[in-house]
Amino acid sequence: MKKILVTGGAGFIGSHTVIELLKSGFEPVIMDDFSNSDVRALEGLQKICERNLIVYQLDCTVEENLRKVFSEQLPIGVIHFAAYKAVGESVENPLKYYHNNLASMVQLLKVMGTFGVNQLVFSSSCTVYGQPDVLPVIEDTPERFAESPYGYTKQVCERIMRDYCSANPNFNCALLRYFNPIGAHHSGEIGELPYGVPNNLVPYITQTAAGIRSELTIFGSDYNTPDGTCVRDFIHVTDLAKAHVKALGWLENQNGICEAFNIGQGVGNSVLEVVKSFEKVSGLSLNYKIGDRRPGDIEKIYADTSKANRVLKWKTELSLEQALTDAWRWQNKLDDSAKK
Ligand code: UFG
């Protein structure tokens, strides 16, 4: 079986991608320092896959750690998820973000070069666009000044890979620019595990519905959008995970390329629409109020995904309702296991 190194493979998107890799006949090799992920993800994965997985609990900013994994496992490609991702925290502690997100990128490329591994799929973000003038946003849209150190690390990592590809003509790289990943595996065995108070909308909604939070605050209702709340492109994490496998397949047939792809549903939904949709799928009435705008939020963004549809032969299959149903199932399962 062809081995694929999955850095950050115990995280939210990484763990779902591990399943899709196995389903497509790859052998994932998980490398994760568990600083922002949980062993419960591995337990869930092992249940879904009904087998043991190859896991290294190691920090991938350390070159020696990467060398160990590469020499023991000889992966043929890498999917690089390992990174910190909280926008607000990155403003408070920028060096934590610059060190972790950039050092891991540089060390990984160095070690890939040493071992002659030439296929890399990178977790980028629609944050590289800022607030685009024209929607849906296409990959050629010029980048805007990054609002946060987190966003800047994604822009810099993309630049590092472009420069590395220019200098190494055999190297192949897909930059997947995620929009807003939500949902959970339909089995309810893995999903998002936010620490403390969630920053993101959907975990906040499910925790409010579960009674863990008393009330959801919708940040702003005076935006220039149909209902006044922000618009985002929400994509089921399983659809997103599948894009990585498609990208790997595409990279195998390339010879020196570095391409960015928008990975979203291609549809904009407002925050209020998500709340209403959750109420519909759960049959519950959600306790929410309208609050002030959250600093740094952009008004609206959604993806033009035609490049990924055409080039990667990938498209989404799951709806917003399915994603919210799966997120709610996962929340209930978490609450049940906490009660045991
Ligand atoms: N929101 C609320 N209440 C909450 C949480 C969020 O109203 O309690 C709103 C936000 O204001 C925003 C929308 O829900 O309008 C989505 O917010 P998220 O925090 O879920 O997601 P973001 O769009 O802010 O962030 C996502 C990714 C980041 C990425 C960013 C790029 O999570 O990693 O998009 O814009 F950097």
Image (cartoon, helix red, strand yellow):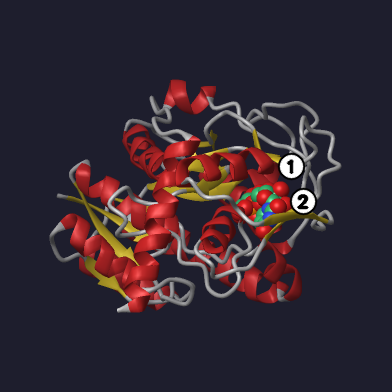
Residues marked 1 and 2 touching at CB (< 8 Å) = yes
Q: State the SS at label 2.
A: loop
| Residue 297: assigned label | 2
Name the residue: 39% across, 48% down.
326
Residue 301 lies, in percent from the top left, at 69, 36
- Label 2 crowd bin: few (<14), some (14–19), many (20+), radius 10 Å: few
Q: How many badges with numbers are in the image?
A: 2
- Label 1 crowd bin: few (<14), some (14–19), many (20+), radius 10 Å: many
Name the residue: 60% across, 53% down.
286
Task: Residue type at mark 2: give it.
Answer: Asp
State yes or no: Cβ of the residue under disc 2 lies below 8 Å from any atom of ligand 1.
yes
Task: Residue type at mark 1: give it.
Answer: Cys
Nearer-the-camera pick, 217 or 17: 217
Name the residue: 56% across, 49% down.
124
| Residue 230: assigned label | 1
Identify whether 238 is placed above or below 211: above
Nearer-the-camera pick, 299 or 166: 299
Q: Is residue 252 visible?
A: yes
> Nearer the observer, disc 1 or disc 2?
1
Gap between marks 1 and 2, in whole Å? 8 Å
Nearer-the-camera pick, 280 or 217: 280
Identify whether 152 is placed above or below 88: above
Residue 272 lies, in percent from the top left, at 68, 42
